[in-house]
Image (cartoon, grey):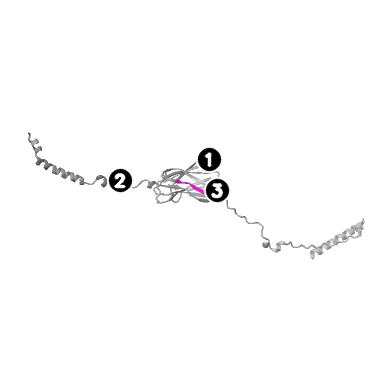
Amino acid sequence: MSRAFSALLNLGLVSAMLVPAAAYAQTASSLPSSTSSVPSSVSSLPSDTAATALTVSLPASMTAQAGSQFVLPLTVSEGKGIGSFAISVIYDPSKVTYVKTEASTDTQGFKFVDGELDADGGLKERIIGGSSATKIDKSGQAVLAQITFTAHSTASGDLTFKLNNPLDDISTATLQNGTVTIGAAAVSSTPSSSAPASSVPSSLSSTPEISSTAAPTVAAPDALNQTGPGATLALLAVALALSFALHRRRAA
């Protein structure tokens, strides 16, 4: 037999080889499981869903008077980081008229654009957008825009303003529609132009009596019924008498 084969038959040598093999097996079984020692990447990383859970809304309940203007604030639940947005507001043009869209204190410096489309059922869809190179740096609720409408003088009841199609930094937002209750227009009372009787001075209620002085009566002599020179003298006498009477009246 060869020397190598004789070595394999040597029991002492085999035993010497088995001892370190058994020791290695025990050492391997004592090692910790790699699965249990490595932290789960899913549980340790923050969720991105919470960061994008925005809500954009209009007032759920507000009141306005027929014939007057009212303002709808467009609100987002978390404003920080918003630098660009667009959204549609669907409304009933037979009840209200769109006036304008303006920035709020949270969106000063934003540039706004808007346009209008026809919607189903005779409604209108006002598209509003705003953008700025400087994003909103406010944590928590923020007002994106102030939207002004005028209620028609004949409008009444509850009106729904529906939000639709959010884009850009609010594209994942949950939308909450607004409701405005239109009440009757305020009636202004006009004061009566006629003054009460007690305020009229008593001196104006009566007209002062104007006394008249009757002109003296001058009896015409019978000579007026005559003709000729005697009649002429009689006329002169009457004229003198009238002149005298008028002179006395003026003197008095």
Up the image or down, 236 lies above or below 103; here it is below
Residue 239, image quadrant: bottom right
Q: Amino acid at mark 1?
A: Gly
Disc number at residue 157? 3
Neighbour tally class for label 1: few under 14, some 14-19, many 20 plus, Cα within 10 Å: few
**246 is higher (above) or lower (below) than 8:** below
Residue drawn at (9%, 38%), measured in percent from left and top? Answer: 9
Q: Is residue 130 magenta?
A: no
Q: Quadrant of residue 169?
A: top left
Q: Nearer the viewer, residue 46 or 98?
A: 46
Tell me if 90 is positioned left or right of 21 in this view.
right
Identify the residue position indicated by label 1 in the image: 121
Sort mark 3 into few (<14), some (14-19) or many (20+) by Cα contacts within 10 Å: few
In the image, residue 11 above or below residue 185: above
Q: Is residue 181 magenta?
A: yes
Pointer 2 residue:
41
Instruction: Give the x, y percent position of residue 61.
Output: 50, 50
Q: Secondary structure at mark 1?
A: helix
From which residue to which does the magenta span run?
A: 175-182
Instruction: Find numbered disc 3 in the image and state the secondary structure of the residue it sits on.
Output: strand
Horizontal relation, residue 83 to residue 27: left or right: right
How far is the residue under mark 3 from the one under mark 2? 55 Å
Q: Give the amino acid type for the residue marked by disc 2 in the picture.
A: Ser
Secondary element at image label 2? helix
Question: What residue appears at the point 18 percent right and 44 percent down from the top-left corner?
Answer: 25
User: Which one is nearer the viewer's eye here, 4 or 76?
Assistant: 4
